[in-house]
Amino acid sequence: MLREVTATRYVAPLRSGGSVPGVVEADDLGTYVVKFTGSAQGRKALVAEVIVGELARALGLRFPELVLVHFDPAIADEEPHQEVRDLHSASVGLNLGMDYLPGAQDFTPEIAARCTVDPLEAGKVVWLDALTVNVDRTVHSSNLMIWPTLGIAPPRLWLIDHGAALVFHHRWDGADPTKAYDFRHHALGRYTPDTRAADTELAPRVTEELLRGIAAEVPDAWLADEPGFATPDAVREAYVAYLHARVRASAAWLPTDFPSREELAAEEARRAAKTQQGRPSWLKRVPDLHGRPAAEQDWSVHLG
Ligand SMILES: Nc1ncnc2c1ncn2[C@@H]1O[C@H](COP(=O)(O)OP(=O)(O)O)[C@@H](O)[C@H]1O
Ligand SMILES: [Mg+2]
């Protein structure tokens, strides 16, 4: 079960995210990023966070701990923005917290250009996103972070924010487990993701038993009153049935048509030649350091 904690201090809102999560400290002395039940994305986003995040963890991908957070808006009464205060008052009670990774950096296109990600690790992330129909892991909104960044340990890739996954739960009657996944703008597409190897390794691990255990982590309150379902358990079973059917149909949705390393390198070389051509002759002798990593950025050696 997810641990339950009580928020004791409100630190700040995270305005870069669309759902305006809040950073809080809690009675277990932990610091958490809280996703609020009252946000515009609604409680289905929290259901997706729990199911996809815990599935990622079960499959060995890096994902910060999730907790259930009791939140009393009174702890944030110094928050100056009315829309954030409204969000808090609409979220009294149980919300979702994710362990805060201090100093973590968003995996932006600039950072991505300097990094190497192992094709199998990239393949596993793309595979998870395709299985769970996550539409929010794109080049410009990667929902990936790098942590730690202080040189005390090797930097690694962490998954966050699965609120926009499981899109089928917005229209259960049209849910098709064989639906193709649009991977063209995936944040890790440039690393020649080995989705076939990922499928071979991960698909057999996604059993009904695993999915049932994960669906059981979602609080009843976030599943209650779902149109077409009599009980929260009936909704849980629908998630299990869909994801289990989809994992067995991976041939129908497995993204495999990523450009090869050679194709990407050729494209990069064409781009560099064009840049060089446009330079005045004195600048042609200056080495092009643009995009070179300042320190070790090849995480593939640290995969564990
Ligand atoms: N666990 C975390 N540790 C550190 N920073 C985080 C964490 N989770 C989110 N953030 C920061 O907050 C931003 C918004 O979080 P995210 O979960 O993507 O929310 P949204 O649903 O609003 O997009 C992230 O881009 C990141 O900068
Ligand atoms: Mg996000």
Image (tube, helix red, strand yellow):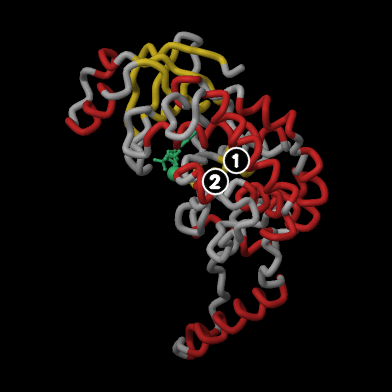
Is ligand 1 within 8 Å of the beta carbon of the residue shown at mark 1? yes
Position of residue 11 relative to residue 115, above or below, is above
Q: In which quarter of the image is the N terminus?
A: top right
Count of numbered marks: 2
**Which is more N-terminal, label 2 or label 1?**
2
- Residue found 50% across the figure and 59% down from its top: 139
Tell me, yes or no, whether the two marked residues, 1 and 2, touch with CB atoms within 8 Å: yes
For ligand 1, the image quadrant comes to top left
Q: What residue type is labelled 1?
A: Trp
Residue topped by disc 2 = 144
Q: What residue type is labelled 2?
A: Leu
Residue 155: quadrant of the picture: top right
The C terminus sits in image quarter: top right
Vertical position of residue 225 compared to residue 171: above or below: above
Relative to 71, residue 261 above or below: below
Please determine whether, in this image, residue 55 is positioned above or below residue 111.
above
Residue 212: % across, % down: 67, 28
The image shows residue 135 at horizontal and vertical percentages of 50, 53
At 62% across and 64% down in the image, what residue appears? 190
| Viewer-proximal residue among 260 and 216 | 216
- What is the secondary structure assignment of the residue under circle 2? strand
How packed mark 2 is, by other alpha carbons closer than 10 Å (few <14, some 14-19, many 20 or more), is many
Which residue is located at x 75 percent, y 43 percent? 302
| Residue 158, numbered label | 1
* Image coords of residue 303 (percent x, y): 76, 43
